[in-house]
Image (cartoon, helix red, strand yellow):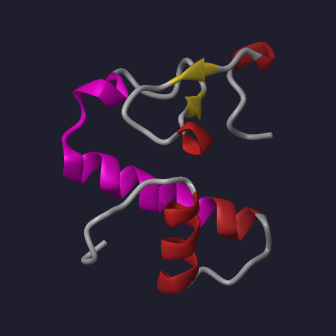
C-alpha cells in the first residue's frame, strides 16, 4: 500500500487523522507538525483525491468531503 514507509515501516505523522497519518519516512523535509492549517488542509485534499483515484472512484468534491469526514478531519470549504 502506497502509504507504507520504507521497507514496510510506518511512521505516524502528527497533525493528521490516523487514517491519513502514516507517511513514508522520506516523503518531505518538513514534518506535518510544522505545517499551517491551510497546508494540512491542502495535504488532506491531495491525499483524498489520490485515494479516490487509486480506488477507481470518481474524484468529486462530495466524494473528497465524504472521505475526509470519514477520517474525522475537516477542511475549509474552499478546498
Is the magenta region chiefly helix, strand or loop?
helix
Residue 33 highlighted magenta (yes or no): yes
| Residue at the image position 60 percent from the left and 80 percent from the top | 59
For the image, the number of numbered tags is 0
Point out residue 58 in the picture as x, y percentages from the top left corner. Answer: 68, 84
Point out residue 19 in the picture as x, y percentages from the top left corner. Answer: 61, 43
Q: Is residue 12 above or below residue 22?
A: above
Tell me the quarter of the image containing the C terminus.
bottom left
The answer to which of 71 and 27 lies nearer the viewer is: 71
Q: With 69 as the anchor, is 4 left or right in this view?
A: right
Q: Is residue 8 above or below residue 64?
A: above
Q: What is the magenta range? A: 30-50
Point out residue 65 in the picture as x, y percentages from the top left corner. Answer: 48, 74
| Residue at the image position 53 percent from the left and 20 percent from the top | 26
| Residue at the image position 61 percent from the left and 61 percent from the top | 50
Q: With 33 as the anchor, is 52 left or right in this view?
A: right
Tell me the quarter of the image containing the N terminus.
top right
Query: Within the image, what quadrant is residue 75 found in?
Result: bottom left
Query: Within the image, what quadrant is residue 20 found in?
Result: top right
Point out residue 21 in the picture as x, y percentages from the top left corner. Answer: 53, 35
Residue 24 highlighted magenta (yes or no): no
Q: Is residue 58 above or below residue 17?
A: below
The answer to which of 17 and 58 lies nearer the viewer is: 17
Amino acid at each position: 500500500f502506497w502509504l507504507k514507509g520504507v521497507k514496510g515501516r510506518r511512521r505516524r505523522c502528527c497533525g493528521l487523522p490516523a487514517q491519513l497519518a502514516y507517511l513514508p519516512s522520506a516523503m518531505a523535509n518538513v514534518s506535518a507538525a510544522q505545517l499551517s492549517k491551510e497546508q494540512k488542509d491542502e495535504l488532506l485534499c491531495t491525499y483524498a483525491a489520490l485515494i479516490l483515484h487509486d480506488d477507481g472512484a470518481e474524484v468529486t468534491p462530495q466524494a473528497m468531503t465524504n472521505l475526509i469526514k470519514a477520517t474525522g478531519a475537516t477542511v475549509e470549504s474552499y478546498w
